[in-house]
Image (cartoon, rainbow, N blue to C red):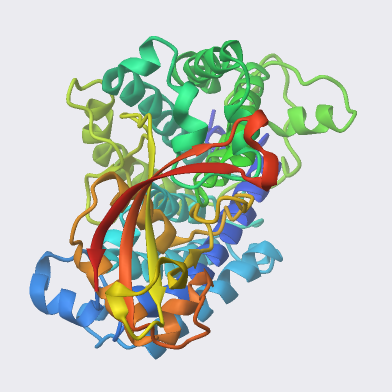
Amino acid sequence: MDWTSWIGLLDAQDSWIAREIVQRGVAAVYVLAFLSTFHQFPVLLGERGLLPVPAFLDRVGGSAGPTLFRHVPYSDALLRGMCAAGMLLGLAVVLGLPQQGPAWSMLAVFGTMWAMYLSIVSVGQIFYGYGWESMLLECGALVGLLGSHAVPPPQLMMLFLLWLLIRLEFGAGMIKMRGDRSWRDLTAMDHHHETQPMPGPLSRTAHLMPRWWHRAEVLGSHAVQLGIIWLVLAPQPVASFAACAVIATQLFLVVTGNYAWLNWLTILVACAAISDGFWRWLLGGPFPGWSWFGVPLGADGGGAGADVSSPLWWTVLVAAAFVGLAVLSRKPLANLFSSHQLMNASFDRFHLVNAYGAFGSMTERRYEVLIEGTEDAAGHHADEETWRAFEFRGKPGDLRRLPRQVAPYHLRLDWQMWFLALRPGAEPWFVALLERLADGDPGVRRLLARDPFDGRAPTALRVRYSLYRFARREERSGGARWVATDLGVIARR
């Protein structure tokens, strides 16, 4: 066997469809991420934001992550320009334009989006401190190395996508088993749909399901995350069926909650385990034969582009990147089996190989922080009926309002309000938020669903603390979807 034949073994000839789905899907998520940043970043972190980037960089200096803004002074105009460029690049991939170029064209496009988004995440502070930010960066780095239509999908990068999927699912399963007894006694889902950060339209329906259903939810989660996930490394078509199990559980999370693009990215990465033959079978073709990582067993057939082979320089580049990523995988691998497992942690400054996980600790009660204002001249001594609440776009407030489906779009302020309710206190960003609302700041109010004062500055603000729960079926009179217990005023301004 000559060297060209050996290189051919590194081509995933049964993954052309998977590459197309993964690349275009990840690019679409980048478009959403840049769009979210375009609208929200200037208000939250801009020049006059709640946690301004210039002040942050002055304070932390070189300890901030890699960012363009360390070398070019930050401005809201520059930030929006980067977001616009990122959206255009992402849309180009969705439309399939860079895919028509040489192998390196996709690496250039995704590398640019990755670098710009890394610059944003590195200065995003608390508003960008989520696992799906690191996941998007890792996905961007990987799918750029899948190449264009000029070369077959590289086997090594498809394999690394499976390693990412295992870290996502198995890491989440282990953090649950180690972190909270409710996952071990199968009671975790008794409260999850009600207490999750941002419920969706079907969350109340899911919460009101019988206990046996909630036990089945936990068992299904454990089965996929702790067991079935390893089958993505099995020969085809077993790997494809395992990926479908992952996709099914993620779609359930999509329709019962709002987790930005986390579930959709997981679905896209899971598609890397589905062979072209399996896709054709789903569309009515013959059942796929057995293969190992896209190499048919006992046959010489290949995928859609079996007549295309990778040049030596591209194979060497991908192999070098794979070796580098494998070296960076040492700590994430050890973390999976550590008794002190970290959740949503990055072990390198570039977010190339990360640790993931969610809900290692479950909350059994839902608390809400409500911000109210009054225009009464008496200020804090105003009559109770003059106080009106600011409504957020995603977080619960009005008891009759149906929770919204906002994911895969990410409402960053709403998510921070959920964390604030768990540990109410004088968080710097929240103090700044109250100051902006008191001043009638138009930027902050654009992030809200309803401003009861139509842009006018209230004479006084107060912060209430409440215990929320879903209304039971017999409590729906009057259209209430939530029942709230007022726990009192915790702050005034």
Tell me where residue 31 sits by quadrant.
bottom right
Q: Is residue 354 left or right of residue 252?
A: left
Res 391 visible: yes
Residue at position x 33%, y 57% from top? Answer: 464
- The x and y percentages for residue 21 are 66, 47
Residue at position x 42%, y 49% from top? Answer: 132
- The x and y percentages for residue 79 are 39, 82
Q: Is residue 163 above or below residue 412?
A: above
Image quarter (top left, top right, bottom left or bottom right) of the N terminus? top right
- The x and y percentages for residue 456 are 45, 88
Q: Nearer the viewer, residue 346 or 412?
A: 412
Q: Is residue 232 left or right of residue 127?
A: right
Residue at position x 61%, y 57% from top? Answer: 148
- The x and y percentages for residue 462 are 31, 67
Tell me where residue 53 sits by quadrant.
bottom left
Res 12 visible: no
Residue at position x 35%, y 23% from top? Answer: 176
Image quarter (top left, top right, bottom left or bottom right) of the C terminus? bottom left
Give the residue furthest to the right: 284
Q: Is residue 236 above or below residue 84?
A: above
Q: Is residue 480 left or right of residue 181?
A: right
